[in-house]
Image (cartoon, rainbow, N blue to C red):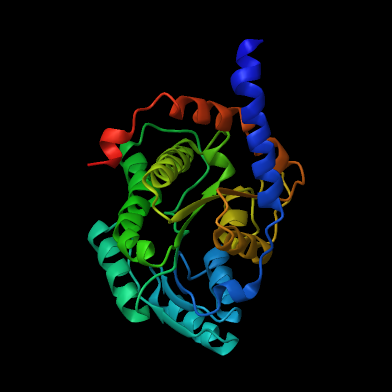
Amino acid sequence: MAFMKKYLLPTLGLFLAYYYYSANKEFRPEMLQGKKVIVTGASKGIGKEMAYHLARMGAHVVLTARSKERLQKVVSHCLELGAASAHYIAGTMEDMTFAEQFVTKAGELMGGLDMLILNHITKNSLNFFQNDIHYVRKIMEVNFLSYVVLSAAALPMLKQHNGSIVIVSSMAGKLAQPLVAPYSASKFALDGFFSSIRKEHSIAKVNVSITLCVLGLINTDTAMGAVTGIINLPAAPKEECALEIIKGGALRQEEVHYDSSPWTSLLLENPGRRILEFLYLRKYDMDKFINN
């Protein structure tokens, strides 16, 4: 009882207040006007739709994906839609040297960076795990390690602009699901790594927000081709999904939950995890890390 009065009830009150006030923040498209934004995996699907939304809002964009031809078309349409500027740099995120150099080149093209949206993934198929370690390694490198490389390379520029990192993840990175074990591992890794980095930013007073976007089934061509005949779920529209991701980053939200079901966001909210994180953090002596 004493524990509840001293720790649990005050903590619950803090979290309820946090959710109440954060829910009342209002997104305005002009928040992105003139902002300098990187979008990866931008040649199709959600990435392409994010590029188009950002263009309509008057942002500067640098896009990347593997297909030069598709990127050329997306950039051309971004300029038609009103982008302040639009460029592309084609390459594969299997190459960590390319990932690091891409961020540097993008920053040079735009003269800085306000928002880094990481959206790319490697090809994934639904199947039982067949002990293919090479496949697991490739998925972890592209879906997770390249995100770490890109964010590390971008951080100095983002610090200068009090910027944002937006991580596009999946329900498979929050819930155990069959047929996607390697993919799921990469998405769980994103949550673990970037949620921890968010704590470090808060402690060290680094004003770079990190938004984790947890997506359900979205009606991209790639997703629908993979799940047809296997998963019987309604798919949410990619255009609206792309906008919700951008909103979450602009509002500096910790997490965005987007799915066709109205219950998803409510059920994924995990006050228990947040309370435990808060309580565990009180046990750390951070002075020797902050002062060094």
Using residue 222 as the reference point, say whether residue 218 is left or right of it: right
Q: Quadrant of the N terminus?
A: top right
For residue 122, above or below residue 130: below
Task: Tell how many labels.
Answer: 0
Identify the residue shown where x is 49% and y is 47%. 125
What percent of the width, then of the height, locates residue 109?
34, 80
Q: Nearer the viewer, residue 289 or 53?
A: 289
Quadrant where the C terminus sits is top left
Q: Is residue 17 visible?
A: yes
Quadrant of the rendered structure where residue 284 is?
Answer: top left
Q: In the image as oriented, which residue stretches furthest toward the top? A: 1
Q: Say which residue appears at 53% left-offset and 43% top-offset.
A: 126
Please state if 38 lies on the left or on the right of 248 as rendered. Answer: left
Residue 258 visible to an observer of this rendering: no
**Residue 186 located left or right of residue 91:** right
Q: Which picture quadrant has residue 155?
A: bottom left
Near-viewer residue (283 or 71): 283
In the displayed orientation, state which residue is furthest to the bottom.
80
> x and y percent of residue 183 in the render?
46, 42
Residue 285 horizontal/vertical position (percent):
34, 28
Q: Is residue 101 left or right of residue 29?
A: left
**Where 274 falls versus 104 (above or below)?**
above
The residue at 47%/35% (across/down) is 181
Residue 30 placed where, x, y %? 61, 76
Q: Nearer the viewer, residue 4 or 97?
A: 4
